[in-house]
Image (cartoon, grey):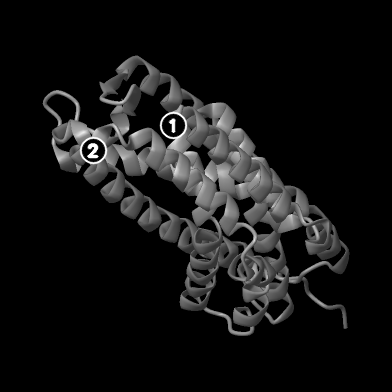
Amino acid sequence: MNAIRTGCETNPASGRQAGRGAPFVFFGTVALLFTAATAVTILSCASMETMGAVPMAGGWLLSGIWLPLCGQSWFETAASFLGMWFVMMVAMMLPSLSPVLWHYRKASLEIGAKQPDGLAALAGAGYFAVWTGFGLVVFLLGAALAQIAVQFPSLSRLGPVAGALLALIAGLSQFTHWKALLLADYGRLPNVLSARIGLLEAVRTGTALGLRCCLSCIGPMAALTVSGLMDLRLMAGATIALTAERLLPAATRIADAIGVAMAAAGLLLLVQALG
């Protein structure tokens, strides 16, 4: 008796072809997201240049991202900053995050997940949600310090020295045991949490990974914020540095090399501020 095809069967050959095509679809999607985020970030930086900056006592400029524009509320200022921050983080973090999400997708598929791409997307959403929360903290601190600098010129004169010291401390933090542990943990968490399939587990995977990433990035992001958060050259350098220290083997000691460069830059800024 001949079997009747219902159209619901899966052809093994086509399944293998789909499996071979999965990396192209996944990383192609990542590339499109990265390109779009980079383009929007470049446009945001260009628009920030037209806003100008506020000259401060001590000979430095306060970026307009920390202050409301004419007729703009603080809520609107914060929303604008967070939108800019989110897109910027997508552009900066996707190069180092995408291999981890791909590994998480594969692990989820191996234990029977029916929608591994959806789980990977949820993990990514959780990851960037944490980064958005981190951005809110950055904005609140930056806006508070900006208000202090505007209202108290005597304290504003300390801005260059304080910024240089922060950059120097950020560079030295690269040599700490805490930093080494955070980098060692990066990429291990998805393996552990992918032992359970579920939407909540995917979000937990992303948020836990995002939290570790934010903690390990405190030093470089502090240095970037002090030196110029919307400077495209510094942003590109930070992206390369953060990607390298996550993806390259620990034996390369790339984190130490980045720390040397950051500390040297902070020391140079300190000498200029005191001179």
Q: Amino acid at mark 2?
A: Leu
Residue on which the image places disc 2: 155
Cβ–Cβ under 8 Å for marks 2 and 1: no
Q: Is residue 178 left or right of residue 62?
A: right
- Seen in the picture, residue 141 relative to 155 is either above or below; the reply is below
Residue 243 percent location from the top left of the image: 68, 49
Q: Is residue 240 left or right of residue 54?
A: right
Label 2 – label 1 distance at C-alpha: 15 Å
Residue 139 percent location from the top left of the image: 31, 46
Residue on which the image places disc 1: 274
- Seen in the picture, residue 218 relative to 57 is either above or below; the reply is below
Say which residue appears at 66% left-offset and 67% top-offset. 180
Residue 126 percent location from the top left of the image: 47, 63
Mark 1 packing: few (<14 Cα in 10 Å), some, or many (20+)? few
Task: Please identify the residue farthest to the top as the structure is shown.
Answer: 50
Q: Is residue 181 left or right of residue 56?
A: right
Task: Please identify the quarter of the rendering in which residue 235 is found.
Answer: top right
Looking at the rendering, in which quadrant would you find the N terminus? bottom right
Say which element carries label 1. Answer: helix
